[in-house]
Image (cartoon, grey):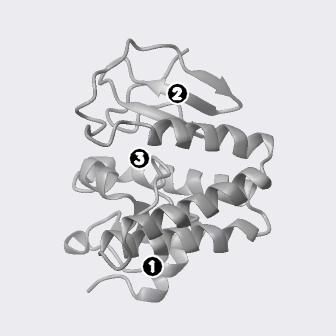
Amino acid sequence: MDFTEETKKTIRKKAMFKCCFCQNLDIEIHHIKREEDGGSNDISNGAPLCPNCHERFGNDPNKRKRITEARDNWYEVVERMYPDNRELSRTEKISTKLLKFQHNQINLDDFKQVLKDFANETINNMTLGTAASTASGIANASVSPSMSPSASPSPSPSPSESVDGVHFNVVCGKCGTKVGLLVGSDVCPTCGELITG
């Protein structure tokens, strides 16, 4: 048995439709403790993970504690950042459009227009916090479409900038993972190495 649709919807909303490790959209609801190992199908056993983080962390029972900590931390960050849930409907809308695009239900030009509208609304309502996040997202999106992030040449690691538990432009010194924005964590989402600098 799987999570009910209502449980999945609740988890998605608590996570603002974003992965608890990397904050990417397009999340799957992961069983922290597998059903085969006695895990339940309730909210307490679910974690919002994007496909990459799901593959990276999801099949390793030794990472259950890390997944739970990342999920709980991300839920706290979401509550602090969006106390009145005004942003929820915008994020839900863009997440829904992303899924439609991935399933070929809308074409690239239509999806680009959705992104432009979302970006313009974000820019028009920008605060200091959203400015940093938006800049990071734009910088991450500027990777050449002919190259995947893993295939792109690695620049020399530079120290990350950090403000109150938020790291910008992180390059892990151990595995080379590049993260534009790392919130509420001091560890690389790929290898677990401590982020310094």
Name the residue at the front extreme. Answer: 109
Asked if residue 76 can be seen in this view, the reply is no
Q: Quadrant of the N terminus?
A: bottom left
Q: Residue at x 71, y 60 (%)?
A: 121
Callout 2 environment at 10 Å: few (<14), some (14 to 19), or many (20+)?
some
Q: Is residue 118 above or below residue 74?
A: below
Q: Nearer the viewer, residue 45 or 121?
A: 121
Q: Position of residue 193 (x, y in %)?
A: 38, 26
Task: Check whether the beta carbons of the residues at disc 3 and disc 1 lie within 8 A of each other.
Answer: no
State the CA–CA distance, disc 3 to disc 1.
Answer: 20 Å
* Residue beneath disc 3: 66
Task: Check whether the beta carbons of the residues at disc 1 and disc 2 lie within 8 A of each other.
Answer: no
Callout 1 environment at 10 Å: few (<14), some (14 to 19), or many (20+)?
many
* Residue beneath disc 1: 8
State the CA–CA distance, disc 1 to disc 2.
Answer: 31 Å
* Residue beneath disc 2: 169
